[in-house]
Amino acid sequence: MGALSNARPVVIICTRDRAASEPFYRDVLGLKMTGSDDFAAVFDIGGAPLRLSTVGDWKAHEHTVFGFAVDDIRKTVAALTKMGVRFTIYPGFGQDENGIWTTPDGAVKVAWFSDPDGNNLSVTQFS
């Protein structure tokens, strides 16, 4: 067994502005906030902590920093869209009108969106 084979994941997402990001993760994405300190707001994601950590000079990356596996991507995209989330459509990528991309074999569907800091997040449905 490896040193981390029984470790639980801890997700860390950086933010410049916790005052803007906390409501997004709590109210828009619907994550339960379990704590807060001077360094981070903590949310529960399937039993693992997601730490929304304040980094004053944070600059978001263009690639996905975190993804959520969902049972029904169409329902999830519709619900998030209703909450004001705008899904990213990449030119030439072949996504549908809702921003959902399907792998050529149809086994996986993915849609991307950004948090208030511009962190690229995704929802994914595995068949």
Image (cartoon, rainbow, N blue to C red):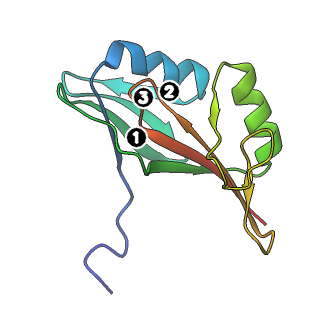
Residue 96 image position (x, y, % from top left): 80, 47
Mark 1 to mark 2 CA distance (whole Å): 10 Å
Instruction: Name the quarter where the N terminus is drawn.
Output: bottom left
Give the quarter of the image for residue 105: bottom right
Q: Which residue is mark 1?
A: 50
In percent of the image, x 79 and y 66: which residue is there?
Answer: 127
* Horizontal side, residue 72 vs residue 33: left or right: right
In percent of the image, x 42 and y 20: which residue is there?
Answer: 22
Say what amino acid the circle numbered 2 marks: Tyr
Say which label, 3 or 1, has the lower sequence index. Answer: 3
In percent of the image, x 60 and y 22: which residue is there?
Answer: 28
The relative height of residue 56 versus residue 91 in the rendered view (above or below) is above
Nearest to the eye among marks 2 and 3: give it: 2
Q: Which residue is mark 3?
A: 34
Say what amino acid the circle numbered 3 marks: Thr
Tell me if mark 3 has few (under 14), some (14-19) or many (20+) residues whose alpha carbon lies within 10 angstroms of its own.
few
Tag count: 3
Nearer-the-camera pick, 85 or 35: 85
Q: Are marks 3 and 1 in contact (CB under 8 Å)?
A: no
Residue 89 image position (x, y, % from top left): 65, 41
Q: Are marks 1 and 2 in contact (CB under 8 Å)?
A: yes
Nearer-the-camera pick, 75 or 109: 109
Residue 120 image position (x, y, % from top left): 47, 41
Q: Which residue is mark 2?
A: 25
Give the secondary structure at mark 3. strand
* Horizontal side, residue 20 vs residue 31: left or right: left
The relative height of residue 66 versus residue 36 in the rendered view (above or below) is below
Say what amino acid the circle numbered 1 marks: Leu
Give the secondary structure at mark 1. strand
The relative height of residue 109 versus residue 68 in the rendered view (above or below) is below
